[in-house]
Image (tube, rainbow, N blue to C red):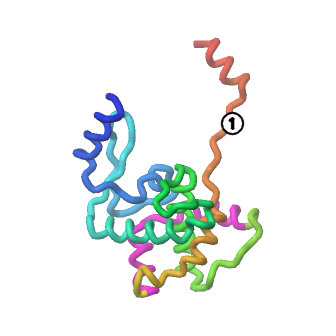
Amino acid sequence: MNEDEYKDVYQRVIGTKCVYEKTILLQFAQCDHAEKRLLAEREAVNCSSEACQFRCQKFLDVTRQNARFALGQTQADEQLPHSKEVKVQAGGLFGLQQLLENSDPINIEPLDDYNQRFNEQQKAIVNINGCLEKAEQHYLNLDKFPYADIVKAILRFEVRKKRQRNKRDSTSRLRSS
């Protein structure tokens, strides 16, 4: 299946695409409205609720706009590279969740301490929709979220690095096959 065919089938099968598809597929978060689908040996995620998808899209758009300068993006409509998009999605959710749990602005901590704590909390986002609902109840409106603090969490968030294979291991695998 070529890429154009895949995109056509994706549109028909998935319908309402999950805004946080990358974050969910990378296992940084889950959502009660997310439905994983297998399509041409790839995973895709659709959203079962258009209202929740709209709220997620609005939060992500505002978060991305607030983080644009901090991420070094010069144009508002410039598409983010994959790693920066994951940073905005997952880091934004983790930052929002931390604010809701602590009710205090995120303090700037040494990077090692933050990463250690982040790794401990990594599985904590069980429901993206629930996190956004709780935040709306707490802050009353998406526009009143403390985006400055959320951007701090985005900047501290580190996407998992790919494991480096040992050249000797990969060479020996090729020889043995």
Tell me which secondary structure the magenta stretch mostly adopts: helix
> For this view, does 41 lie left or right of residue 155?
left
Q: Depth check: 124 or 135 in front?
A: 135
Quarter containing the C terminus: top right
- Which residue is at a point 39% across and 70% down the rendered structure image? 58
Compared with 97, 83 (above or below) is above
Q: Which residues are magenta?
A: 114-139
Classify mark 1: helix, strand or loop: loop
Q: Depth check: 59 or 162 in front?
A: 59
Which residue matches tag 1? Answer: 164
Q: Is residue 131 magenta?
A: yes
Figure label count: 1
Q: Residues within 10 Å of mark 1 (few under 14, many from 20)?
A: few
Quarter containing the N terminus: top left
Q: Is residue 127 magenta?
A: yes
Choose top left, top right, bottom left or bottom right for residue 108.
bottom right
Compared with 8, 170 (above or below) is above
Find the residue positioned furthest to the left.
12
Q: Say what amino acid the circle numbered 1 marks.
A: Gln
- Which residue is at a point 61% across and 53% down the rendered structure image? 159
Q: Position of residue 140 (x, y in %)?
A: 41, 87
Compared with 38, 106 (above or below) is below
Q: Position of residue 91 (x, y in %)?
A: 56, 64
Q: Depth check: 76 or 177 in front?
A: 76
Q: Position of residue 83 (x, y in %)?
A: 57, 51
Choose top left, top right, bottom left or bottom right for residue 52.
bottom left
Compared with 126, 1 (above or below) is above
Q: Position of residue 103 (x, y in %)?
A: 57, 85
- Which residue is at a point 49% across and 63% down the rendered structure image? 76
